[in-house]
């Protein structure tokens, strides 16, 4: 580590799942030298998935460079996957950034930008398989590190992702100290993954996703077909 | 449950630790019937602890009623503990709300409003003992339920708190379904509590808190002395 700040940018877009970036932001803000930015297409407030709006601190046009970019997921990910300004910004940043990262369906946005082609990557469990349509190798793990791509599973996996990044850069002692500082000793109910969930709960959630999110499935398939053709 | 919305208000104040409320907001937003508000003294953006600013959706003056209020913690908690408008709003809401709740050092704000007198309550581990100065019984657990007061430990405990509230209101099946939806199967490093941390890490973090936050310790003691006298 040097005295240079480690500049981290979280991408923001309408319909982002806020915990996808607020979780890792809370951990990474405590990493020695970290300087966080929240970057969007304009400086207008961004409406997240759950009624909370947040303010960008920088825009694509600022043309600032970052050491790490992180793309969160959320209901708005399909629009982000087709937004030229978003994809351009990601591609520009990815050429210089030390780490190109994502949480949840943010991996699909990175993939749509062509930035996961040939990489192993994680995603929210309900969408992991879609990564293959963009030339990535889907991996059902909570955090996946492949060269400088670090990708995480669904929503809450972003917190574990944050600690993995801290451990990579600063070592395990610092990561554990920050973990103690924010009392990260979770006490989940059982069944937070498809494999560990009770079958009736898994079937309920899978059916709800397939019905409620049929449009998103179709949109991703359509984007992927253009991606493959292009 | 009825068809009435279940109105949840998160208190916002400058210097709030954003994960204290963004964690439970992400879980509770998925609870059937939930309607989330983010309430502050004015509608100006609120600067949180880690460079992210959020927009209130309601102010104290709106005089709206809520079924549940939740007070997050953070570096700004001592100012909140002495802010008359904040304490007035909490006391007014607490007379009607079904649940009066807090996460992390948000418990100290509830306590300063006199709303934990005679209740068992949790808090961030470094500040739990201070609750006794306000007539509460400090409990070192991740989530504590005492009648209609539900309080949580530090920062990330807010996510477990959210699921406990969902399980209380809607049953365990719904809580597990939402947990699967946001893939809550955490993989922490070891040592997220003082008891489970390696001694050298615990000593490092405790020393850092005691040195860096000596002012906050002094401020809370001063506020508590006035509380006891009043």
Image: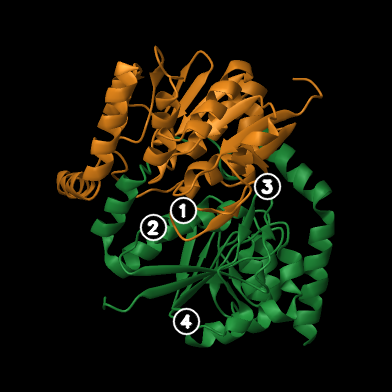
Chain colours: A orange, B green
> Which of A158/A229 is in front?
A229
- Which residue is painted at 40% across and 40% down in the image? A79
Q: CA distance from mark 1 to mark 3?
A: 18 Å
Regarding residue A26, the answer to whether it shows in the image is yes
Residue, disc 2:
B163
Q: CA distance from mark 2 to mark 3?
A: 25 Å
Q: Nearer the viewer, mark 1 or mark 3?
A: 3
Q: Residues within 10 Å of mark 2 (few under 14, many from 20)?
A: many
**Residue corresponding to mark 1:** B159
The answer to whether B229 appears left or right of A56 in the picture is right
Of mark 4 and mark 1, the one earlier in the sequence is 4
Q: Position of residue B128 (x, y in %)?
A: 64, 61
Q: Residues within 10 Å of mark 3 (few under 14, many from 20)?
A: many
Location of mark 4 (residue):
B97
Q: From mark 2 to mark 1, how far is it between C-alphas?
A: 7 Å
- Secondary element type, mark 4: loop
Chain label for disc 3: B
Q: In the rendered structure, which disc, 2 or 3, sits on the residue that comes first in sequence?
A: 3
Q: Are dots 3 and 4 on a single chain? A: yes
- The foreground one among A7 and A2 is A7
Which circle marks residue B50 in the picture? 3
Q: To which quarter of the image does residue B46 belong?
A: bottom right
Residue at 46% across, 46% down: A16
């Amino acid at each position: 580590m040097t005295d240079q700040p480690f500049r981290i940018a979280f991408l923001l877009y309408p319909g982002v799942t806020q915990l996808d970036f607020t979780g890792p932001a809370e951990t990474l803000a405590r990493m020695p030298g970290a300087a966080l930015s929240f970057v969007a297409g304009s400086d207008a407030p961004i409406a997240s998935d759950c009624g909370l709006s947040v303010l960008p601190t920088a825009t694509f046009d600022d043309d600032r460079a970052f050491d790490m970019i992180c793309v969160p997921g959320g209901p708005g990910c399909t629009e982000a996957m087709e937004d030229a300004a978003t994809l351009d910004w990601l591609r520009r940043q990815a050429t210089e950034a030390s780490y190109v990262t994502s949480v949840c369906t943010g991996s699909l946005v990175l993939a749509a930008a062509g930035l996961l082609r040939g990489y192993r990557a994680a995603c929210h469990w309900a969408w992991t398989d879609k990564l293959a349509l963009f030339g990535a190798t889907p991996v059902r793990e909570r955090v996946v590190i492949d060269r400088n791509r670090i990708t995480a599973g669904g929503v809450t996996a972003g917190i574990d992702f944050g600690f993995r990044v801290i451990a990579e850069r600063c070592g395990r002692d610092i990561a554990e100290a920050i973990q103690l500082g924010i009392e990260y000793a979770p006490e989940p109910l059982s069944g937070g993954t498809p494999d560990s969930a009770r079958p009736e709960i898994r079937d309920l959630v899978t059916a709800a996703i397939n019905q409620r999110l049929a449009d998103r499935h179709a949109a991703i398939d359509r984007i992927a077909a253009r991606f493959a053709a292009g």
